[in-house]
Image: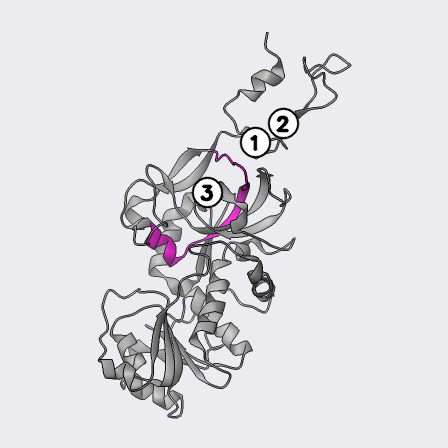
Amino acid sequence: MASLAHRLSNLPIPIFASGLRFRDADANTGASESGRIQIAWPDRSLLETTMKAVVFDAIGSPQDVLYLGDLPMPRIGDGEVLLRMVSASINPGDFLFIQNLYPEPKKPHFPRQIAGNHGAGIVEAVGANVALKPGTLVAFSYYNSWAEYAAVPAAWLIPLPAGYPVERAGQMVNPITAWDLLADSRVQPGQWLAVTAGYSSVSTMVMQFAQRRGINVIALVRRSRDRLDLKGLGATAILDLSSLKVGIREAVMDMTDGAGLNGIIDNVGGPVSGELIRTLAMGGQMVINGGRSTERFELHNFDVLLSGLEIRANIYRYFFSPPVEADRQVLREIVDIFGRPDFHVPVGGIHPLAEFELAVTNSLDRADLGKQIFRM
């Protein structure tokens, strides 16, 4: 008869070198000196064969194609890490992925593509050539984050301090994006920056980073909401488009005492963006980070040429490639600031995976509520 160890090794469950083992057992029979087999049971993740995940089988609207499914537990290879997911944020980029709007290689693969590209988890097991220790909390931007477990190449992981707030750990993409957007805008202390979609998580983080640097911020919103105090988050002024009595240019010039804008971070697009560009001072920058509007904006060459303007796109720094050693210092600074109690992170809802429909709907329709987060 085959030994128990041999039969266990052939079970269809992911058993790793650091998992199942025998204590004081004979190498051939698995028997201890007392004649009883003593098993050191592995972690829960090494015994389970399936997990819950939010998945989709076709391209389309997130509200139409997503569903909660049972999937096989992910297996890891050399250089990979098995994570027990603890949180994952819902971001506009996740919806672009579901709608297949991203360029290669960020494409879904069917059937049962797991949604979500950002999150945080606890290291459960590691493959060969991985220095991370089990129990480490990490954040990542990769694939398959709306699930109970994820297999992620170690190179994509950002280790976080012990005790770091897990809801913030799952949002690390947002402060990194906000930090880079502010840098790309090239706005200096005392100058003026405008951010569209003022209630979005990234915009509120830009405001707080800007306030720390002495930069004036105008937050543009479709309509004011009482739930979020944008001035308390660092906005110098709020431009409510629903109650505007004059043109955008006139309103901006009045708010800036005629100085105009030195930078724009645009998450919306459409005609408002075209008007904002015309308020930029000589040499100003517009950084495009999103396109919530379905409309386009128009410019004449002279709108750009005669003012020395620059329009550029923000590509998330870890969209195509993982963090590198040169990023260590800036990541440490971002992680530190983002983890402080005085850095406000508006959270609109914390949901189990089973509430994905509510979480997705709120994220799409009610950005003013704050970030929607999955807790696993």
Provide the residue designation for mark 3.
Answer: 147
Going from the N terminus, do you reach mark 2 or mark 3 first? Answer: 2
Alpha carbon distance from label 2 to label 1: 8 Å
The answer, for residue 329, to whether it is visible in the render is yes
- Residue ID at (26%, 71%): 270
Q: Secondary structure at mark 3?
A: loop
Of residues 110 and 41, the one drawn nearer to the viewer in this rendering: 110
Amino acid type at circle 1 is Leu
Contact? badges 2 and 3 (CB < 8 Å): no
Question: What is the span of residues highlighted in magenta in the rendered image?
Answer: 73-97
The residue positioned farthest toward the top in the image shown: 1
Position of residue 57 measured from the top left corner of the image (x, y, whole percent): 31, 40
Give the label on residue 46, or none.
1
Picture quarter with the N terminus: top right
Q: Is residue 13 magenta?
A: no
Q: Name the disc covering residue 366, or none.
A: none
Query: In the visual, does 190 lie left or right of 160?
Result: left
Q: Which residue is mark 2?
A: 20
Does the rendering let one see residue 233? Answer: no
Q: Residue furthest right?
A: 33
